[in-house]
């Protein structure tokens, strides 16, 4: 499995370098061969290297002040232990409401679609709209998809001891947030989100036993108040700044198919600092806390694209989750960079049931391709704990940094 991951990692890198929606190209002489002897660099060779360098670095130049909308398209394969081999199409756009105001960070939008050989599909759009003078912000995300998943049950012990069962998760999700700046860097806002999630094709009646009496279909409307302190210089890929976000959500049973009124609280603290030339330190602390009657499909989860990378998303899940991670990001050549991170995470049912011994490790390395200024194609290989003598690991690909 690890060997497959390495092969896929290399194929992603090679494929994405040739999948940009640009008019430039690289001329490759089909008769050239690789020789294990030293040959001095000729004028012709130097010109060829220059073409490659320009191809890899050209699109990084900012055009958000030169035109109203700067758009790049990327197609790339990926592999993870939860989705298998996937082909994804990702588009990123950078724009400004007032193209003459280049001191305010630009707005961004990402459109994504992917499908895998095991039947995964996901389609969606997300972005943030920065209004004039950055006094108001509008964030949005819309997605729908279907994914065959493994399920171990709910809680730390279930994830460690149970055998996985298969089912298909189907999701429809909409989220819209609006923020207003009240003083410098401090925003207050509101969010409305709707989630419709249901399970199909579970292959064993034991699956229902794992749920402890809970249902296989839930929908809910969330109404949230938000408070954010944000000094990041560029939200998708910060080089410096602090972010502190607090969200309180209420899910009334009258606006969904849930049996109880539920609540959720999220706390996120992140810090970014330049260390040296091309080097960035990024630190992230995250907590999610749900009420006792929150349905299992809305539980907090470890794993995924942003936190505890490499874990099978949802294997470790419960009402509450706390994670911490620190990452060093280093630009190495042109618009190519690398990253390395380490972190920990814990899932638990209640504060009283929190066990320090249940804390899980996380670490990994990554490769970055900055295909547009401050917008990266991110490839990460993450590792976790050992279960049954096997090391948890997984390969991920995404646009923008993990946090």
Image: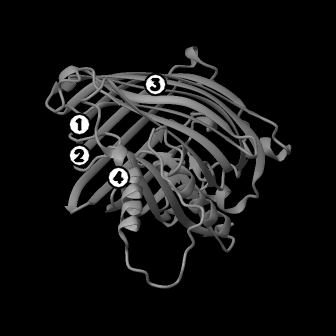
Q: Looking at the picture, does residue 49 appear above or below residue 243? A: below
Crowding near the residue tagged with mark 3, few <14, some 14–19, many ≥20 C-alpha atoms within 10 Å: some
**In the rendered structure, which disc, 4 or 2, sits on the residue that comes first in sequence?**
2
Crowding near the residue tagged with mark 4, few <14, some 14–19, many ≥20 C-alpha atoms within 10 Å: many
- Quadrant assignment, res 101: top left
Crowding near the residue tagged with mark 1, few <14, some 14–19, many ≥20 C-alpha atoms within 10 Å: some
Marks 4 and 2, how far apart in space?
10 Å
- Quadrant assignment, res 326: bottom left
Q: Which residue is mark 1?
A: 229
Quadrant into which the N terminus falls: bottom right
**Contact flag, marks 1 and 2 (Cβ < 8 Å):** yes
Q: Which mark is residue 250?
A: 3
**Contact flag, marks 4 and 2 (Cβ < 8 Å):** no
**In the rendered structure, which disc, 1 or 3, sits on the residue that comes first in sequence?**
1
Q: Is 54 on the left or on the right of 17, as rendered?
A: left
Q: Determine the secondary structure under disc 1.
A: strand
**Residue that appears at 70% across and 40% down:** 120
Q: Looking at the picture, does residue 21 appear above or below residue 336? A: above
**In the rendered structure, which disc, 2 or 3, sits on the residue that comes first in sequence?**
2
**In the rendered structure, which disc, 1 or 2, sits on the residue that comes first in sequence?**
1
Marks 4 and 3, how far apart in space?
25 Å
Q: Determine the secondary structure under disc 4.
A: strand
Q: Determine the secondary structure under disc 2.
A: strand
Q: Which residue ends up furthest to the top in the rendered image? A: 254
Q: Which residue is mark 4?
A: 284
Q: Which residue ends up furthest to the bottom in the rendered image? A: 37
Marks 1 and 2, how far apart in space?
8 Å
Q: From where the camera sits, is residue 325 visible?
A: no
């Amino acid at each position: 499995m690890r060997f497959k991951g390495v092969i896929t990692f290399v194929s992603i890198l090679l494929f994405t370098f040739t999948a940009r929606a640009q008019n430039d190209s690289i001329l490759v002489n089909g008769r050239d061969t690789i020789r294990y002897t030293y040959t001095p660099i000729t004028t012709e060779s130097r010109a060829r290297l220059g073409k490659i360098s320009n191809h890899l670095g050209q699109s990084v130049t900012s055009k958000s002040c030169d035109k109203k909308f700067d758009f790049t398209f990327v197609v790339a394969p990926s592999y993870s232990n939860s989705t298998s081999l996937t082909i994804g199409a990702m588009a990123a756009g950078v724009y400004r409401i007032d193209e003459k105001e280049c001191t305010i960070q630009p707005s961004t939008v990402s459109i994504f679609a992917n499908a895998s050989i095991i039947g995964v599909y996901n389609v969606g759009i997300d972005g943030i709209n920065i209004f004039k003078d950055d006094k108001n912000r509008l964030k949005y995300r819309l997605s729908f998809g279907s994914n065959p998943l493994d399920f171990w049950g709910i809680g730390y012990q279930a994830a460690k001891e149970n055998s996985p069962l298969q089912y298909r998760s189907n999701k429809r999700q909409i989220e819209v947030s609006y923020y207003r700046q009240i003083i410098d860097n401090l925003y207050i806002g509101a969010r409305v989100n709707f989630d419709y999630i249901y399970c199909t094709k579970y292959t064993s009646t034991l699956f229902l036993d794992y749920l402890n009496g809970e249902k296989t279909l839930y929908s809910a409307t969330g109404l949230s108040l938000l408070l954010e302190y944000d000094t990041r210089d560029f939200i998708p890929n910060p080089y410096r700044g602090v972010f502190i976000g607090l969200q309180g959500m209420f899910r009334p049973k009258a606006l969904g198919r849930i049996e109880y009124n539920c609540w959720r609280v999220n706390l996120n603290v992140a810090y970014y600092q330049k260390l040296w030339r091309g080097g960035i330190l990024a630190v992230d602390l995250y907590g999610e806390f749900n009420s006792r009657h929150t349905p299992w499909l809305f539980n907090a989860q470890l794993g995924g694209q942003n936190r505890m990378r490499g874990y099978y998303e949802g294997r470790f899940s419960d009402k509450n989750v706390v994670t911490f991670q620190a990452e060093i990001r280093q630009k190495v050549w042109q618009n190519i960079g690398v990253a390395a991170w380490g972190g920990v995470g814990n899932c638990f049912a209640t504060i009283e049931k929190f066990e320090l011994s249940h804390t899980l490790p996380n670490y990994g390395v990554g490769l970055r391709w900055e295909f547009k200024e401050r917008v990266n194609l991110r490839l990460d290989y993450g590792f976790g704990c050992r279960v049954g003598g096997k090391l948890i690991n997984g390969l991920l690909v995404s646009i923008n940094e993990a946090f």
